[in-house]
Amino acid sequence: MTTGLTTDGCRARQRALREHLDRNQLDAALIGDRRHVHYLTGYWCPAVFASVALLEHDGPTTLVTPHRLDFVPAADVTLHYPAQRRATLIDDQPGAAVEMIAESLRRCERVGVDGPVLPWAHPSAAWADLRPALLTMRRHKNADEVELLWRAIAATEAAYAYAFKALRPGVTEVELFAGMQAAAAEYASEVLGEFGNDFQVGSPGGPPRRRPAQAGEVAVFDLSVTLRGYRSDMCRSFVVGRLPSTEQTDARERILAVLRYVERTAQPGVSCRQLYADAATQLEGYRGWSFPHHLGHGIGLSAHEAPRLNPEWDDTFQVGDVFTAEPGLYGPDLRAGLRIEEIYHLTETGLEKLTTFPTELS
């Protein structure tokens, strides 16, 4: 079973959020995004239900769940709402959850929220948007978050191990997709969330098709195992039939050289836009091939977070970032193209690579 977020980690994040409440003269934070409820309390709610947390500036952290818990979350008060009647779910799960804390909420005049609010719960309150503050907090991953991300990465690598063995001429993309998903779920030993986006062979990416793989094509598999809201994001490229062409081997070497450049360059304060530009210079047009996408992005409770290695943003690296780097090259003579994506954690002592699965094409 996957180790979850720790009480110490959740309490540290609660303290950081209360500091934001203090700076902005807010009486409380009403948290309704289940990812943020998990981030702050350690409780992960299935998607069919709702969970809410109320962090009062000078009061308790109250967690509302759809059922009684068999563990102690990072909350001072735990309540549960009637989420179902004779095993049939009620219609308004969020409303029923917020109703449990309505009295406490009405004592607060200025309330920060992390998403759409239910104004009937406190129609006279002044509401403030907490999402920018939470996104800023989420950039600096605590140790328990990195551990959960590592477990998601390990489950992703279990899927790649299956794909590497199963990929052969004639196998369909749907067969590969199903087997990879099963391998990841077996490793994680729990229900998974979304599972990435690129599962095609002979194509730069896309959903799985009932199309047989052909010898010499490249399978560009970009997977994202989601465990309790935390998302990995990796890419590996394999050659069907295990006989890479000279062009495919050359493209891999150029991609790996760019990854080594990222590893030497990514430090606190470094411009992600400039790093993208440096990488694009090494990739775009090399032997006539193209590099049409971003160089990478942060991961965590969203598929793409800061820092964004992308010319459309002007982010800089910070200590605590967990991010990907995914250089790629594409062209007809590559039988679609190649992309390799690694995950890194920028720590106080340097850059740590969290991914370990080999990058060989065959």
Image (cartoon, helix red, strand yellow):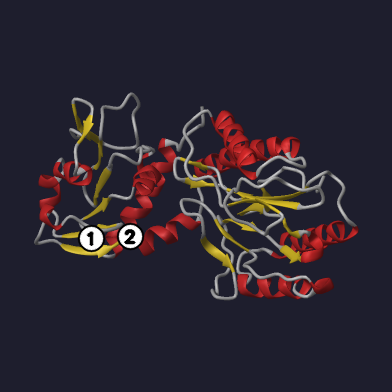
Mark 1 nearby-residue class (10 Å; few <14, some 14–19, many ≥20):
many
Most foreground residue, 331 or 7: 331
Q: Measuring 48% from the left and 30% from the top, which residue is drawn there?
A: 190
Q: Nearer the viewer, residue 182 or 344?
A: 182
According to the image, label 1 marks what residue?
26
Work out whether 192 lies above or below 312.
Answer: above
User: Could you tell which of marks 2 and 1 lies nearer the N-terminus?
Assistant: 2
Counting from the top left corner in percent of width and height, residue 209 is at: 60, 48
Residue at the image position 49 percent from the left and 37 percent from the top: 192
Q: Which mark is residue 20?
A: 2
361 or 263, which is in the foreground?
361
Residue 149 visible somewhere in the drawing: yes
Q: How many numbered markers are drawn? A: 2
- In the picture, measured across the screen, residue 311 lies left or right of residue 253, that is left
Residue type highlighted by circle 2: His
Residue 154: which quarter of the image?
top right
The disc label shown at residue 96, or none: none
Distance Cα–Cα, label 2 vs label 1 = 8 Å
Q: The C terminus appears in which quarter of the rendering?
A: top right
In the image, what residue occupies the spot 22% across and 46% down? 94
Figure quadrant of residue 97: top left
Give left or right: position of 157 versus 78.
right
Up-down relation of residue 293 to residue 117 (above or below): below
Query: At numbered mark 2, what does the secondary structure look like: helix, strand or loop?
Result: helix
The image position of residue 195, as x and y in percent, is 53, 45
